[in-house]
Amino acid sequence: MKILIQGGHLVDPANGVDAQLDLFLEGGLVASVGEAPAGFEPDQVIDASGQIVCPGFVDLQARLREPGQEHKGSIDSETRAAARGGITTLCCPPDTSPVIDTPAVAKLVQERADQAARVRVAPIGALTTALEGEQLSEMVTLAEAGCIAFSNADLPVHNTLVLRRAMEYAASHSLLLMLQPQDAWLAAKGCVHEGVVGLRLGLSGIPESAETVELSRILMLVEQTGARVHFGQLSTGRAVQILRQAKRDGLPVSADVAAHQLHLTEMDLLDYSSDCHVIPPLRTQRDRDSLREGLRDGTLIAISSDHQPHDADAKLAPFAESEPGISALETLLPLTLRLVDEGVLSLEQAIACLTSGPASVIDNHNGHLGVGARADVCIFDPQQHWRLDAQTMQSAGHNTPFLGWDLKGRVTHTLLNGRLSYQEPSKKAED
């Protein structure tokens, strides 16, 4: 199918494009930018006047809950939410049930995502068998089955020798590790940031050192083994400083931050809302500002959703006993655009944090709209205001502290491989 996206403002950070240009798609690929290819007769024209046209978003951390926890969400429901949010590629952590530690489970996730046909799902394989932190998984076999990286999700690898062997193995086969730095012993059973607010609320805290100690341990092993490591969802300013120095030293590392950490702080916990129960916890305003600065100077190269849908019962318990996580796919774009309105990032920087930045981590062919690239496209209205409410959310999980917020920036079209996977009901494509 030949598609013309006409009249939009094209922002493609990977190729340095920021101008009003038409986009021509054919056969699931970008055929041309600006001028029509010879003999191009579109089968469909999408009017993008007054809107931003950019690469489809790449989300480095989103739980789909299937297989094993379909009462919280499914590949069908969560990829529907992802497409509504402009996401065309998302990475699914291995803590499903069963765990993604065999080729069969990895292929199952991909096959069900292909059936839904809305979003490209890239499974992350288990670093250790059953995520128990003891025996290495068959990483090469899992990579051959489509796993793009390896992680132990949010479960610890206590034994440093096991972690070293995993990193040596990954380095010898050029495999990517995606690790979340949190020392389980220091975190203990904490549920909020260790500080004055947590003390006032009577909730057990997770200190900054839980993140920085584990980050430092992994960095020392990176220096020794040469493994390529991406750190997911950093939450502290001190971790940003440590990572900044590691990158200056030439270590093959990168990191992202979850969108909610850029807007919420420990002060949002004062009403005990379990929707603000996240791990790593919401930190101080100083941490939040340092995370923003890390994005601005390129120390952090991506913003992830860290999407974790839950059923209603999971959030009804008292704060400390509720399950952590936010349903976040549909708020990824507006929360990122809020950083533009607040002067933290330029529009091009913000879009890079959702496209070329995360795409560079997983070494795929997405995140840009150069000629010959996959026709994964997001079109959004940067000025459209809307309110997030549970009745219209596409995700099965409605656990988000952003319910009722006035959000700005709404996706009108998402295209996967040159085919519409989402279209805002009020926006009709012109045939």
Image: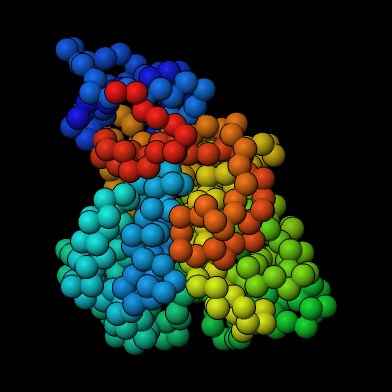
In this picture, is 253 found above or below 359? Answer: below
In this picture, is 326 found above or below 289? Answer: below
Instruction: Give the colour scheme of this rendering.
Output: rainbow
Residue 83 percent across, percent down from the top left: 39, 47
- Along the line of sight, which residue is nearer the eye, 304 or 149? 304
The quadrant of the image that shows the C terminus is: top left
Residue 278 percent across, percent down from the top left: 59, 70
Residue 142 percent across, percent down from the top left: 21, 69
Q: Quadrant of residue 346?
A: top right
Residue placed at 37% from the left, 55% from the top?
A: 79
Q: Quadrant of residue 132?
A: bottom left
- Horizontal side of 34 relative to 38 (left or right) equals right
The quadrant of the image that shows the N terminus is: top left
- Horizontal side of 197 relative to 378 (left or right) equals right
- Along the line of sight, which residue is nearer the eye, 106 or 84? 84
Residue placed at 81% from the left, 74% from the top?
A: 196
